[in-house]
Image: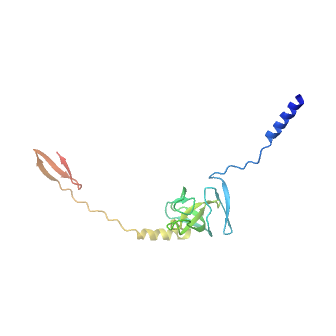
Amino acid sequence: MTMRVILTAALAVMLIGCKANIKPEVNDDTIVTSQINGVTLVHRHIIQAPNNFAPINSQYKALYAAGIINRPEYGGKVVDQLKAGQAYTALGEVQGNWSTQARGAWIAIANDEQQLIGYVPNNSMVKSELYEKTVKEQSRRRPRVHKKAVKPTQQHCVNVNGNEACQKGENGTWMLD
């Protein structure tokens, strides 16, 4: 009897020690790799791999602040922000996936470790060597804003039941004095 209890206890201890291979839980930050058109992309799980990919591998600068999106279409989730004037590595050009407004080129950008961090519309970035020229051209295109000439304030007053009411300012407000 005691031998049977001892063997059962030993068997239970051995079975508890044997665990099945448990795969690590996959979450948004899990690093994965994807093979697209012969190029291996390393990215977080939340970043969707593109359907097609044309390598660029060049330094680009952001023309304006914009959202970095997890897939090459406007319906994607914003995962980070471009900072105007900051340099990024453009890994490649991809095409929008589903809607006609999203069709067109998107740029797959990478961090310093060459890991794909998301997608931005191609008009939000320019090659680093063309950045200064592009910014100057854009500033020349902006229409100049002319300030309105300030009219001298004329006070128009009338007598209302023995009190004086005056129209003040340019918005036509009447004030009782």
Q: Is residue 131 left or right of residue 44?
A: left
**Depth order, front residue of 42/19:** 19
Quadrant location, the N terminus: top right
**Depth order, front residue of 161/50:** 50
Q: Is residue 10 visible?
A: yes
| Numbered circles on residues, count | 0
Q: Is residue 82 visible?
A: no
**Depth order, front residue of 53/59:** 53
List x then y, in percent, for residue 14.
Answer: 83, 39
Considering only vertical position in the picture, is 132 above or below 80?
below
Q: Is residue 119 left or right of residue 32?
A: left
Residue furthest top as drawn: 2
Residue 145 lies in quadrant: bottom left
**Depth order, front residue of 2/56:** 2
Residue furthest left as drawn: 162
Colour pattern of the rendering? rainbow
List x then y, in percent, for residue 63.
Answer: 50, 64
State the residue at coordinates (66%, 51%): 26
Residue 112 lies in quadrant: bottom right
List x then y, in percent, for residue 37.
Answer: 66, 69
State the residue at coordinates (88%, 28%): 2
Q: Is residue 112 left or right of residue 23?
A: left
List x then y, in percent, for residue 93.
Answer: 59, 68
Considering only vertical position in the picture, is 50 above or below 173?
below
Q: Is residue 172 left or right of residue 90?
A: left
Quadrant location, the C terminus: top left
State the residue at coordinates (66%, 53%): 30
